[in-house]
């Protein structure tokens, strides 16, 4: 006769059957439910021997014995759940002072000869400073995770100068332009440009296959560079990309002429937002066209320049960023292929009508960017 005999009540048996039918519990818990049902020695129960239960459900005989014992001594819930063994509490490796030192180190310049701090470098430095006797890189990683510090990560950002009247004047001018409602007689157009190097493959890539990513040879062939002029109308959700072979004043002038004479021929004024690139000047029109035509184009322009180190204020730069991530972040060999890929991206994005809702206002700037204002 078994020392710990399982005899299930009707309610307990029903609960186990419902649990198995639902199948939503942990695998271990379901296995224990099977064990209890097959070990049930109540009237009409199967009362299987331990060896048969173990063989049927792929567990050891010792496991079956433990489940029966916990059921008899502690009840159904204890038999279904894994026994939790208490662990003695351990002193944290890093106290408050040590964590503060670690954070200060992670935010400081790395040692000579290293580009950035690594977890192991930080662990070694804590030992050198006698903050701790020994510590693993994993403990350092967990400690830094709490403070959301990532020594290996660097973000590139346009950092504006502090207390700079020229910056805030240009910023508020552009922000006021973005608050204007749409007017077909004075369409808002944002313009920016970027370069793209044409790169060919030195060896044919190996396509991806199950269990293997695409393989691309690290060698490549340079085929020159091109310029991409991004024209975006944020209120209409429309953009156009012009690919040119060079980045000159005449190339810029031709894009502006196309905007004024072809795209918005009927408009009274074209409100043009752009950055301070050396070619983004009205003088470029006079380098490309006779003075009469250049002046006619200038009269139809209302130009607003974003501040230096404030290119994030240009919606066209946002569109260029999207274009780069979605389309250009790969090797493209020829200008013809680049034009084809860019045209496909442009068509799809225009069909979706992706617009921009500019929410950052002058009031926001005066509150959130107080340090940029000389008098605030």
Image (cartoon, grey):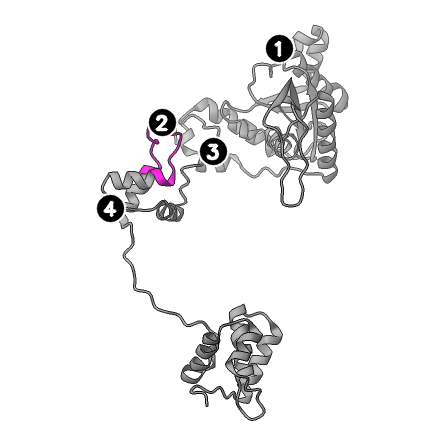
Q: Nearer the viewer, residue 59 or 230?
A: 59
Residue 128 on image: x %, y %: 25, 38
**Number of other residues with Cα within 10 Å of mark 2, as a class: few under 14, some 14 to 19, many 20 or more:** few
In 3D space, how far apart are the residues under numbered discs 3 and 1 (Cα atoms)? Answer: 35 Å
Residue 114 within the magenta-colored segment of the rendering = yes
- Does residue 142 sit above or below 48 in this rendering? above
* Left or right: 281 in relation to 300: left
Q: Which residues are magenta?
A: 105-121
**Number of other residues with Cα within 10 Å of mark 4, as a class: few under 14, some 14 to 19, many 20 or more:** few
Of the 4 image quadrants, the one containing the C terminus is top left
Tell me if label 2 and label 4 are in contact, CB under 8 Å. no
Frontmost of labels 4 and 3 is 4
- Does residue 342 sit above or below 254 in this rendering? below
Q: Mark 2 or mark 1: which comes first in sequence?
A: 2
Q: Which residue is mark 4?
A: 133
| Residue 95 disc label | none
Residue 177 on image: x %, y %: 59, 30
- Does residue 237 sit above or below 16 in this rendering? above
| Residue 283 disc label | 1
Q: Which residue is mark 3?
A: 155
Say which quarter of the image contains residue 88: bottom left
Say which quarter of the image contains residue 269: top right
Q: Residue at x 55, y 24 (%)?
A: 306
Residue 277 on image: x %, y %: 56, 18
Frontmost of labels 3 and 1 is 3
- Does residue 68 sit above or below 42 in this rendering? above
Q: Secondary structure at mark 2?
A: loop
Residue 249 within the magenta-colored segment of the rendering = no
Q: Which residue is mark 2?
A: 113
Q: Mark 3 or mark 1: which comes first in sequence?
A: 3
Frontmost of labels 1 and 4 is 4
């Amino acid at each position: 006769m078994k020392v710990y005999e399982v005899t299930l009540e009707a309610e307990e048996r029903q609960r186990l059957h419902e649990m198995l039918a639902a199948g939503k519990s942990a695998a271990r818990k379901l296995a224990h439910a099977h064990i209890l049902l097959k070990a049930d020695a109540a009237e009409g129960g199967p009362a299987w021997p331990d060896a048969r239960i173990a063989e049927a459900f792929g567990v050891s005989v010792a496991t079956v014995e433990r489940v029966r014992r916990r059921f008899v001594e502690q009840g159904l819930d204890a038999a279904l759940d894994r026994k939790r063994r208490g662990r003695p509490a351990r002193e944290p490796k890093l106290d408050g002072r040590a964590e503060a030192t670690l954070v200060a180190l992670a935010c400081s310049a790395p040692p000579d000869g290293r580009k950035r701090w690594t977890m192991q470098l930080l662990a070694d430095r804590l030992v050198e400073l006698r903050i701790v006797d020994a510590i693993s890189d994993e403990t350092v990683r967990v400690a830094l995770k709490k403070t959301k510090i990532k020594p290996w990560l660097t973000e590139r950002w346009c950092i504006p100068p502090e207390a700079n009247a020229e910056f805030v004047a240009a910023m508020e001018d552009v922000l006021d332009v973005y608050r204007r409602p749409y007017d077909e007689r004075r369409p808002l157009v944002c313009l920016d440009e970027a370069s793209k190097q044409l790169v060919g493959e030195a060896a044919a890539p190996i396509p991806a296959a199950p269990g293997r990513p695409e393989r691309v040879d690290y060698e490549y062939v340079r085929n020159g560079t091109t310029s991409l002029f991004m024209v975006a109308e944020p209120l209409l959700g429309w953009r156009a990309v012009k690919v040119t072979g060079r980045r000159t004043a005449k190339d810029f002038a031709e894009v502006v002429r196309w905007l004024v004479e072809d795209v918005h021929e009927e408009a009274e004024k074209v409100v043009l937002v752009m950055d301070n690139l050396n070619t983004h000047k009205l003088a470029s029109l006079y380098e490309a066209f006779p003075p009469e035509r250049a002046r006619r184009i200038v009269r139809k322009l209302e130009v607003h320049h974003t501040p230096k180190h404030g290119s994030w204020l240009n919606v066209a730069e946002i569109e260029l960023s999207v274009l780069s991530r979605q389309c250009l972040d790969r090797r493209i060999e020829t200008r013809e292929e680049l034009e084809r890929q860019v045209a496909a991206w442009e068509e799809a994005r225009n069909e979706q009508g992706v617009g921009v809702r500019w929410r950052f206002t002058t009031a926001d700037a005066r509150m959130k960017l107080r340090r940029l204002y000389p008098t605030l």
